[in-house]
Amino acid sequence: MAAIPPMPILLQPVYKEYIWGGDRLRHEFHRRLHPGTYAEAWEVADHPDGQTRIITGPDAGATLAEAIRRRGPGLLGAGRTDTAFPLMVKIIDARETLSVQVHPDEAAAARFGGEAKSEMWVVLSATPDAHIYSGFKPGTTPADFERARAAGAIPSLLQRFPARPGMVFHTPGGRVHAIGAGCLLLEVQQDANTTYRLYDWDRLNRNGHPRPLHIEQALRVINWSLTGSPIAPVQPVETRSPGHTVRPLLADPHFVVDEWTVSAPCDIAHDSRSFLILFPEDGDLRIKTPGQPAMILQRRSTCLLPAALASFSLQPARSDAPPVRLLVTRLP
Protein backbone atom coordinates (compact mmCIF):
# COMPACT_ATOMS: atom_id res chain seq x y z
CA MET A 1 0.00 0.00 0.00
CA ALA A 2 1.37 3.42 -0.95
CA ALA A 3 2.30 5.72 1.90
CA ILE A 4 -0.18 8.52 2.56
CA PRO A 5 1.49 11.86 1.73
CA PRO A 6 1.72 14.45 4.52
CA MET A 7 -1.32 16.71 4.67
CA PRO A 8 -2.60 19.67 6.68
CA ILE A 9 -3.94 18.73 10.09
CA LEU A 10 -7.03 20.31 11.62
CA LEU A 11 -7.60 19.92 15.36
CA GLN A 12 -10.55 20.15 17.73
CA PRO A 13 -9.82 22.96 20.19
CA VAL A 14 -10.13 22.51 23.94
CA TYR A 15 -12.22 25.28 25.50
CA LYS A 16 -11.61 26.60 29.00
CA GLU A 17 -14.26 28.42 31.02
CA TYR A 18 -12.70 30.79 33.55
CA ILE A 19 -14.42 33.59 35.43
CA TRP A 20 -12.57 36.34 33.55
CA GLY A 21 -13.56 35.07 30.08
CA GLY A 22 -16.16 36.36 27.64
CA ASP A 23 -18.26 35.35 24.63
CA ARG A 24 -16.21 36.46 21.62
CA LEU A 25 -15.24 32.89 20.76
CA ARG A 26 -18.91 32.20 20.14
CA HIS A 27 -19.89 35.46 18.49
CA GLU A 28 -16.78 36.74 16.67
CA PHE A 29 -15.22 33.37 15.83
CA HIS A 30 -18.57 31.65 15.20
CA ARG A 31 -17.52 28.59 17.18
CA ARG A 32 -20.33 26.15 17.91
CA LEU A 33 -20.37 26.36 21.67
CA HIS A 34 -23.01 26.17 24.34
CA PRO A 35 -23.59 29.46 26.18
CA GLY A 36 -20.84 30.00 28.71
CA THR A 37 -17.86 32.09 29.77
CA TYR A 38 -15.14 30.95 27.39
CA ALA A 39 -11.79 32.40 28.37
CA GLU A 40 -9.43 30.28 26.25
CA ALA A 41 -9.46 28.07 23.20
CA TRP A 42 -6.50 25.73 23.22
CA GLU A 43 -6.05 25.45 19.46
CA VAL A 44 -2.96 23.24 19.55
CA ALA A 45 -2.25 21.48 22.83
CA ASP A 46 -0.71 18.27 24.10
CA HIS A 47 -0.83 18.65 27.86
CA PRO A 48 -2.44 16.66 30.70
CA ASP A 49 -4.71 19.66 31.32
CA GLY A 50 -5.98 19.71 27.73
CA GLN A 51 -5.36 17.65 24.60
CA THR A 52 -6.54 18.68 21.16
CA ARG A 53 -7.57 15.81 18.89
CA ILE A 54 -6.94 15.54 15.18
CA ILE A 55 -10.10 15.73 13.07
CA THR A 56 -8.70 15.22 9.54
CA GLY A 57 -6.57 12.66 7.71
CA PRO A 58 -5.32 9.20 8.67
CA ASP A 59 -4.74 10.20 12.32
CA ALA A 60 -8.28 11.50 12.84
CA GLY A 61 -9.36 10.90 16.43
CA ALA A 62 -5.81 10.70 17.76
CA THR A 63 -4.26 13.13 20.20
CA LEU A 64 -1.09 14.92 19.20
CA ALA A 65 0.88 12.60 21.50
CA GLU A 66 -0.53 9.58 19.68
CA ALA A 67 0.27 11.14 16.32
CA ILE A 68 3.81 11.82 17.46
CA ARG A 69 4.25 8.16 18.36
CA ARG A 70 3.11 7.24 14.84
CA ARG A 71 4.85 9.98 12.85
CA GLY A 72 7.74 11.14 15.04
CA PRO A 73 10.10 13.51 13.21
CA GLY A 74 7.79 13.46 10.20
CA LEU A 75 5.37 15.51 12.27
CA LEU A 76 7.69 17.48 14.54
CA GLY A 77 10.89 17.99 12.56
CA ALA A 78 14.03 16.21 11.47
CA GLY A 79 15.99 14.91 14.45
CA ARG A 80 13.28 15.72 16.99
CA THR A 81 12.79 13.08 19.67
CA ASP A 82 9.95 14.72 21.63
CA THR A 83 7.27 12.46 23.04
CA ALA A 84 4.90 15.42 23.53
CA PHE A 85 4.15 18.36 21.28
CA PRO A 86 6.56 21.11 22.43
CA LEU A 87 4.31 24.16 21.96
CA MET A 88 0.80 25.30 22.78
CA VAL A 89 -1.28 27.82 20.82
CA LYS A 90 -4.28 29.53 22.42
CA ILE A 91 -6.86 32.20 21.76
CA ILE A 92 -7.51 34.27 24.89
CA ASP A 93 -10.66 36.34 25.42
CA ALA A 94 -10.22 38.56 28.47
CA ARG A 95 -13.53 40.19 29.32
CA GLU A 96 -12.01 40.95 32.73
CA THR A 97 -8.39 41.46 33.74
CA LEU A 98 -6.50 38.26 34.50
CA SER A 99 -4.68 37.73 37.77
CA VAL A 100 -1.22 39.19 38.25
CA GLN A 101 0.91 36.10 37.74
CA VAL A 102 4.28 34.64 36.85
CA HIS A 103 5.60 31.41 35.31
CA PRO A 104 8.98 29.80 36.00
CA ASP A 105 11.78 29.84 33.47
CA GLU A 106 13.97 26.78 32.85
CA ALA A 107 16.37 27.49 35.70
CA ALA A 108 13.60 28.12 38.23
CA ALA A 109 11.61 25.07 37.10
CA ALA A 110 14.69 22.88 37.45
CA ARG A 111 15.34 24.23 40.93
CA PHE A 112 11.85 24.56 42.39
CA GLY A 113 9.61 22.39 40.21
CA GLY A 114 6.78 23.26 37.88
CA GLU A 115 6.89 23.66 34.10
CA ALA A 116 8.95 26.34 32.41
CA LYS A 117 6.82 28.68 30.33
CA SER A 118 7.79 31.43 27.94
CA GLU A 119 4.96 32.98 25.94
CA MET A 120 4.10 35.68 23.45
CA TRP A 121 0.85 37.41 22.51
CA VAL A 122 -0.38 38.94 19.29
CA VAL A 123 -3.25 41.36 19.88
CA LEU A 124 -6.09 40.38 17.52
CA SER A 125 -8.52 43.03 18.77
CA ALA A 126 -8.87 45.22 21.81
CA THR A 127 -11.23 47.73 23.34
CA PRO A 128 -9.97 51.35 23.33
CA ASP A 129 -8.91 51.18 26.99
CA ALA A 130 -7.31 47.69 26.90
CA HIS A 131 -3.88 47.30 28.46
CA ILE A 132 -1.20 44.73 29.20
CA TYR A 133 0.59 44.72 32.56
CA SER A 134 4.11 43.35 32.14
CA GLY A 135 7.16 43.54 34.36
CA PHE A 136 7.78 45.49 37.52
CA LYS A 137 8.74 49.13 37.25
CA PRO A 138 12.55 49.56 37.20
CA GLY A 139 14.08 49.47 40.65
CA THR A 140 11.27 47.46 42.27
CA THR A 141 12.62 45.23 45.03
CA PRO A 142 11.20 42.30 47.03
CA ALA A 143 10.79 44.71 49.93
CA ASP A 144 8.74 47.05 47.74
CA PHE A 145 6.59 44.09 46.77
CA GLU A 146 5.93 43.10 50.38
CA ARG A 147 4.88 46.66 51.26
CA ALA A 148 2.57 46.82 48.24
CA ARG A 149 1.12 43.41 49.04
CA ALA A 150 0.32 44.49 52.60
CA ALA A 151 -1.39 47.59 51.24
CA GLY A 152 -3.26 45.72 48.48
CA ALA A 153 -1.40 47.82 45.91
CA ILE A 154 0.59 45.31 43.84
CA PRO A 155 -0.70 46.72 40.50
CA SER A 156 0.95 50.06 41.31
CA LEU A 157 4.34 48.36 40.90
CA LEU A 158 3.62 47.05 37.40
CA GLN A 159 4.42 48.57 34.04
CA ARG A 160 1.25 49.19 32.00
CA PHE A 161 1.15 49.27 28.20
CA PRO A 162 -1.75 50.05 25.85
CA ALA A 163 -2.86 47.02 23.81
CA ARG A 164 -3.57 47.74 20.15
CA PRO A 165 -4.40 45.30 17.33
CA GLY A 166 -1.23 43.95 15.73
CA MET A 167 1.01 44.58 18.74
CA VAL A 168 3.28 41.74 19.87
CA PHE A 169 4.17 41.20 23.54
CA HIS A 170 6.90 38.83 24.77
CA THR A 171 6.67 37.33 28.26
CA PRO A 172 9.55 35.01 29.13
CA GLY A 173 9.42 32.93 32.27
CA GLY A 174 10.08 35.00 35.40
CA ARG A 175 8.31 38.14 34.12
CA VAL A 176 5.29 39.19 36.20
CA HIS A 177 2.29 40.06 34.02
CA ALA A 178 -1.46 40.33 33.60
CA ILE A 179 -3.66 40.54 30.51
CA GLY A 180 -6.02 43.47 30.84
CA ALA A 181 -9.76 43.53 30.25
CA GLY A 182 -10.81 43.93 26.62
CA CYS A 183 -7.90 42.04 25.05
CA LEU A 184 -8.43 39.30 22.47
CA LEU A 185 -5.07 37.60 21.88
CA LEU A 186 -3.37 34.77 20.08
CA GLU A 187 -0.86 33.18 22.46
CA VAL A 188 2.10 30.99 21.54
CA GLN A 189 3.89 29.33 24.44
CA GLN A 190 5.90 26.39 25.63
CA ASP A 191 3.89 23.27 26.42
CA ALA A 192 3.29 24.17 30.07
CA ASN A 193 0.52 25.16 32.45
CA THR A 194 2.29 26.28 35.63
CA THR A 195 0.93 29.62 36.86
CA TYR A 196 1.61 31.32 40.19
CA ARG A 197 -0.87 34.06 41.15
CA LEU A 198 0.31 37.07 43.13
CA TYR A 199 -2.85 39.16 43.05
CA ASP A 200 -6.40 38.60 41.77
CA TRP A 201 -8.02 42.04 42.04
CA ASP A 202 -10.02 40.95 45.14
CA ARG A 203 -12.15 38.80 42.84
CA LEU A 204 -14.39 36.00 44.09
CA ASN A 205 -15.02 32.74 42.28
CA ARG A 206 -18.47 31.34 41.50
CA ASN A 207 -18.71 29.99 45.04
CA GLY A 208 -18.04 33.39 46.56
CA HIS A 209 -14.48 32.61 47.66
CA PRO A 210 -11.17 34.18 46.63
CA ARG A 211 -9.10 32.11 44.24
CA PRO A 212 -5.87 30.79 45.80
CA LEU A 213 -2.67 32.79 45.55
CA HIS A 214 0.83 31.34 45.30
CA ILE A 215 3.01 34.03 46.85
CA GLU A 216 5.79 31.77 48.13
CA GLN A 217 6.17 29.93 44.82
CA ALA A 218 5.98 33.17 42.82
CA LEU A 219 8.69 34.89 44.84
CA ARG A 220 11.01 31.98 44.11
CA VAL A 221 10.69 32.32 40.34
CA ILE A 222 10.33 36.08 39.71
CA ASN A 223 13.15 37.60 37.68
CA TRP A 224 13.32 41.11 39.13
CA SER A 225 15.55 42.34 36.30
CA LEU A 226 12.87 41.90 33.61
CA THR A 227 11.77 45.54 33.66
CA GLY A 228 12.25 46.54 30.00
CA SER A 229 9.44 46.85 27.49
CA PRO A 230 7.81 43.55 26.49
CA ILE A 231 6.67 44.98 23.14
CA ALA A 232 8.47 43.36 20.22
CA PRO A 233 9.85 45.98 17.81
CA VAL A 234 8.31 46.28 14.35
CA GLN A 235 10.41 44.42 11.78
CA PRO A 236 10.81 45.28 8.08
CA VAL A 237 8.94 43.16 5.58
CA GLU A 238 11.09 40.66 3.70
CA THR A 239 9.88 39.53 0.29
CA ARG A 240 10.31 35.80 -0.27
CA SER A 241 8.50 35.14 -3.55
CA PRO A 242 5.84 36.63 -5.81
CA GLY A 243 2.55 36.85 -3.97
CA HIS A 244 4.10 36.12 -0.58
CA THR A 245 5.89 38.32 1.96
CA VAL A 246 7.17 37.57 5.45
CA ARG A 247 7.52 39.90 8.45
CA PRO A 248 9.37 38.48 11.46
CA LEU A 249 7.45 39.08 14.69
CA LEU A 250 9.35 37.31 17.45
CA ALA A 251 12.16 34.80 17.89
CA ASP A 252 12.09 33.17 21.33
CA PRO A 253 14.52 30.34 22.19
CA HIS A 254 11.51 27.97 22.09
CA PHE A 255 9.46 29.24 19.13
CA VAL A 256 9.51 31.61 16.18
CA VAL A 257 6.45 33.54 15.00
CA ASP A 258 6.26 35.39 11.67
CA GLU A 259 3.47 37.17 9.85
CA TRP A 260 2.99 36.12 6.25
CA THR A 261 0.95 38.13 3.78
CA VAL A 262 -0.43 36.13 0.86
CA SER A 263 -1.76 38.30 -1.95
CA ALA A 264 -1.73 35.83 -4.88
CA PRO A 265 -1.11 32.12 -5.51
CA CYS A 266 2.36 31.22 -4.23
CA ASP A 267 4.35 28.02 -3.93
CA ILE A 268 6.20 27.44 -0.67
CA ALA A 269 9.22 25.14 -0.39
CA HIS A 270 9.34 23.85 3.18
CA ASP A 271 12.33 22.18 4.82
CA SER A 272 11.85 19.34 7.28
CA ARG A 273 13.26 21.04 10.38
CA SER A 274 9.93 21.99 11.95
CA PHE A 275 6.17 21.80 11.65
CA LEU A 276 4.30 25.02 10.81
CA ILE A 277 1.17 26.28 12.59
CA LEU A 278 -0.97 28.57 10.44
CA PHE A 279 -3.52 31.06 11.77
CA PRO A 280 -5.13 33.41 9.21
CA GLU A 281 -5.83 36.70 10.91
CA ASP A 282 -8.17 38.44 8.50
CA GLY A 283 -9.32 36.22 5.64
CA ASP A 284 -9.94 32.68 4.46
CA LEU A 285 -6.92 30.85 3.03
CA ARG A 286 -6.72 28.15 0.36
CA ILE A 287 -4.07 25.48 1.04
CA LYS A 288 -3.01 22.95 -1.59
CA THR A 289 -0.58 20.11 -0.85
CA PRO A 290 0.80 17.44 -3.21
CA GLY A 291 -1.53 14.51 -3.75
CA GLN A 292 -4.41 16.06 -1.78
CA PRO A 293 -7.43 18.17 -2.70
CA ALA A 294 -7.26 21.83 -1.75
CA MET A 295 -8.71 22.86 1.59
CA ILE A 296 -10.03 26.19 2.87
CA LEU A 297 -8.71 27.33 6.24
CA GLN A 298 -11.22 29.78 7.62
CA ARG A 299 -10.30 33.12 9.11
CA ARG A 300 -9.06 32.81 12.70
CA SER A 301 -8.83 29.03 12.56
CA THR A 302 -5.71 26.97 13.12
CA CYS A 303 -3.95 24.38 10.97
CA LEU A 304 -0.85 22.27 11.62
CA LEU A 305 1.43 21.42 8.70
CA PRO A 306 3.70 18.41 9.38
CA ALA A 307 7.44 18.87 9.04
CA ALA A 308 7.60 16.21 6.33
CA LEU A 309 5.41 18.31 4.03
CA ALA A 310 8.09 19.43 1.56
CA SER A 311 5.96 21.88 -0.42
CA PHE A 312 2.55 23.48 -0.49
CA SER A 313 0.77 26.39 -2.12
CA LEU A 314 -1.27 29.20 -0.59
CA GLN A 315 -3.64 31.82 -1.91
CA PRO A 316 -6.63 33.83 -0.72
CA ALA A 317 -9.72 31.63 -0.79
CA ARG A 318 -11.41 33.89 -3.36
CA SER A 319 -9.72 35.38 -6.41
CA ASP A 320 -11.23 38.80 -5.65
CA ALA A 321 -10.30 38.72 -1.94
CA PRO A 322 -7.77 41.14 -0.45
CA PRO A 323 -4.40 39.79 0.77
CA VAL A 324 -4.59 37.40 3.72
CA ARG A 325 -2.34 37.95 6.72
CA LEU A 326 -1.52 34.82 8.68
CA LEU A 327 0.53 34.10 11.76
CA VAL A 328 3.00 31.25 11.24
CA THR A 329 4.61 29.50 14.20
CA ARG A 330 7.56 27.10 14.04
CA LEU A 331 10.39 25.77 16.15
CA PRO A 332 13.69 27.67 16.03
Image (cartoon, rainbow, N blue to C red):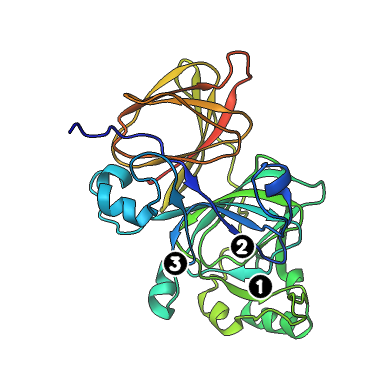
Q: What residue is shown with label 1?
A: 140
Q: Mark 2 belongs to which amino acid? A: Thr
Disc 1 is placed on an element classified as loop
Q: Is residue 163 visible from the viewing direction of this image?
A: no
Disc 3 is placed on an element classified as loop
Relative image position of residue 297 (x, y in whole percent): 53, 32
Number of numbered discs overlaid on the protein picture: 3
Disc 2 is placed on an element classified as loop
Q: Earlier in the sequence, mark 2 or mark 1?
A: 1
Q: What residue is shown with label 2?
A: 227
Q: Nearer the viewer, residue 244 or 70?
A: 70
Q: Mark 1 belongs to which amino acid? A: Thr
Q: Determine which of the numbered discs, if any, sits on residue 23 in the image.
A: none
Q: Is residue 98 visible from the viewing direction of this image?
A: yes
Q: Disc 3 to disc 1, how far (Cα)?
A: 36 Å
Residues tagged 2 and 1 counted as in contact (Cβ below 8 A)? yes
Q: Earlier in the sequence, mark 3 or mark 1?
A: 3
For mark 1, does the 10 Å Cα neighbourhood hold few (<14), some (14 to 19), or many (20 or more) residues?
Answer: some
Name the front one of labels 2 and 3. Answer: 3
The vertical placement of 221 against 61, above or below, is: below
Relative image position of residue 21 (x, y in whole percent): 71, 59
Name the front one of labels 3 and 1. Answer: 3
Residues tagged 2 and 3 counted as in contact (Cβ below 8 A)? no
